Amino acid sequence: MNPTISDTLVSVPLTDISTAYIADSDQFIADKVFPIVNVDAQSALYFQYNKGDFFRVEVRERAPATESAGSGFDVSQSPVYYCRIYAVHKDLDDQTRRGAMSQFNLERASTLWVSQQLLLQRERVWANAYFRTGVWATDMAGVSGTPSGLQFKQWNDAASTPIEDITGAIITMAETTGYKPNTLVLSPRVLLALSNHPEIIDRVKYTQKAIITADILAALFGVDRIVTPWGIINSAAKGATDAFAFIYGKHALLVHSAPNPDLMMPSAGYIFAWTGYAGTGAYGNRVSSFRIEARKSDRIEGEMAYDARIISSDLGIFFNNAVA
């Protein structure tokens, strides 16, 4: 693909600032739960393997002077990823620049603002793709009353049993898929409820320090890590009273996530980042800087190109309304 005019205006220094900011933003998780697969093409087919073929035993005893048992695994090429481009800009007018102490500080501040906007949008895309009912093979529903079926008593209730609920889900996934979940995503309110739950406090009070951390909870539940998204969003229109709320609500998600971006490895999800987009960073992000003479302004424009895909829906269990 030939470069466009906007491609030639991509700023490597500003893109580097954006990339560093994205990597260091601890309150966002969209790049921390599932591996990022860097792709050259905006859209393409990707391989999906038949999980059952990897656990069906095809080995047979070999008789003298005979061939070994032959078999294999099927590959589907029907899934398609498509990296949408999300973009936003901030204009720096000449009058503001004239009164600024440092031109570079204005550009840096604008780059950080643009990057923050892109991260907020990516979190919303991630939450809509993964952190809701109807997308995973198993949805568990938190209830205040007596649970039945695929329900559990909400974990803010002292009479609930979060350890049994989560470890039971781990066993279920391991037995039905062959892969043990290794990552638990807890929204902040769910993390708070679990950290103060009497069942958990009683289990660790003689072996751990007074403050129950995410690492302690991970060891207790038997997962490699717990990830908590702290990102908030203001849903109010500009000029209206601010309305802040956590992006991830009051839910939890248990998944098996591949440790590395390898499409041969099973994973509940992958993030496809279009790094083939001219001048992009590791997250499919780039920042351009160019003049808008009619506005007597310089424009700082940020873009991010990616797709959040569920690869194996049975490698995720969603706990809806985990707390009231």
Image: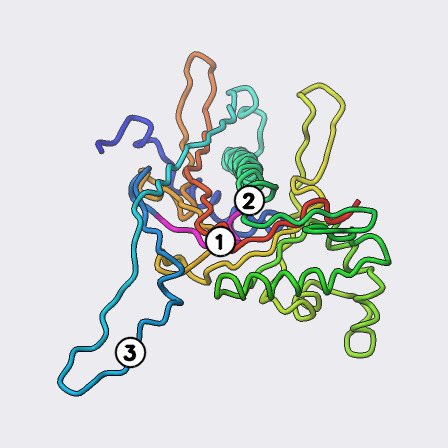
Q: Quadrant of the N terminus?
A: top left
Note whether residue 298 is visible. yes
Tag 3: amino acid: Arg
Q: Name the colour scheme.
A: rainbow
Q: Nearer the viewer, residue 61 or 282?
A: 61
Task: Name the mark nearer the viewer: 1 or 3.
Answer: 3
Residue matched to label 1: 268
Tag 2: amino acid: Tyr
Q: Residue furthest bottom?
A: 64
Q: Say the numbered circle drawn on residue 130.
A: 2
* Mark earlier in primary sequence (1, 2): 2
Please say if the residues under marks 2 and 3 sit with CB atoms less than 8 Å apart.
no
In what element is the residue under mark 2? Answer: helix
* Mark earlier in primary sequence (1, 3): 3
Work out whether 309 lies above or below 238. below
Work out whether 271 lies above or below 67. above
Label 2: how many Cα within 10 Å (few below 14, some 14–19, many 20+): many
Residue span colored magenta: 30-38
Q: Position of residue 32 (x, y in %)?
A: 53, 54
Task: Name the mark nearer the viewer: 2 or 3.
Answer: 3
